[in-house]
Amino acid sequence: AQSVTQPDIHITVSEGASLELRCNYSYGATPYLFWYVQSPGQGLQLLLKYFSGDTLVQGIKGFEAEFKRSQSSFNLRKPSVHWSDAAEYFCAVGAGQTGANNLFFGTGTRLTVIP
Amino acid sequence: EAGVTQFPSHSVIEKGQTVTLRCDPISGHDNLYWYRRVMGKEIKFLLHFVKESKQDESGMPNNRFLAERTGGTYSTLKVQPAELEDSGVYFCASSLTGRNSPLHFGNGTRLTVT
């Protein structure tokens, strides 16, 4: 069965510092991988997705993620964090016949940005 | 285009009462999903509609939950009677047909059962 692990519940970074949020998944074949962000009072917004091809994917708001099959990971990165990036981030995997439709989510990582 | 709309945004009810959540998907999206996040836990799939038909309802917790999608447009999720453990944020999402079509989520309904 599919599963997603986000080992960091809460991360605090200084504005302007780099960021990496970890995500590990469990699935036998090549998964569909996603990062979503939820800002306070908002819904889940898709940051980026990986279906196939280039393992380094670019998303919105300056985020990128790299799919590493050997490590079953899909870590999210940003070179310089802005205060507006404070939010909760969710990694998700979609697999099987339903592809990107039915998703399995991690428990989320809450990002705090300090000035 | 208008996004996925959910209402109410918040609902506080007492144990044993009934609550109905509504979701309006993006126009033209045949797929509609309900997910739920209980505090501090992962977001979990509840069910999936394709147009008006339930494609997969394997995530529905029990028979106190009833989901409908009238005419393949908006959807409702009714909880009757509500229990304390039903508290959480209920998300609706919609997508186009196709395995590569990503989900578009609404802002969620925060349900508190006291």
Image (cartoon, rainbow, N blue to C red):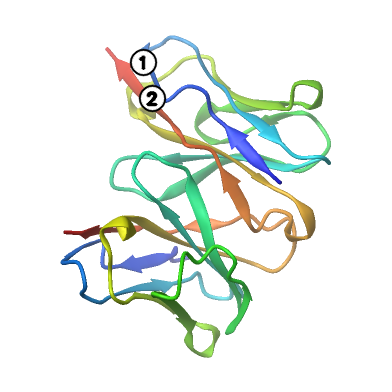
On screen, residue B114 versus residue A27, left or right, reads: left
Dots 2 and 1: beta carbons under 8 Å?
yes
Chain at numbered mark 2: A
Rendered position, B55 above or below A43: below
On screen, residue A115 versus residue B103, left or right, reads: left
Disc nearer the start of the sequence (2/1) = 1
Give, as a three-letter code, the residue at label 1.
Answer: Thr
Rendered position, A29 above or below A67: below
Quadrant showing the C terminus of chain A: top left
Give, as a three-letter code, the residue at label 2.
Answer: Leu
Q: CA distance from mark 2 to mark 1?
A: 6 Å
Q: Which residue is mark 1?
A: A12
Q: Secondary structure at mark 2?
A: strand
Q: Which residue is mark 2?
A: A111
Q: How many neighbours does mark 2 have within 10 angstroms: few (below 14), some (14-19), or many (20 or more)?
A: many
Q: Which mark is residue B92?
A: none
Q: Residue furthest bottom?
A: B71
Q: Quadrant of residue A77?
A: top right
| Residue at 80% from the left image edge and 27% from the top image edge | A69
Q: Quadrant of residue A113?
A: top left
Image coordinates for residue B4, horizontal then vertical, percent = 44, 64
Front residue of B79 and B90: B79
Image coordinates for residue A28, horizontal then vertical, percent = 81, 40
Q: Secondary structure at mark 1?
A: strand
Front residue of A84 and B10: B10
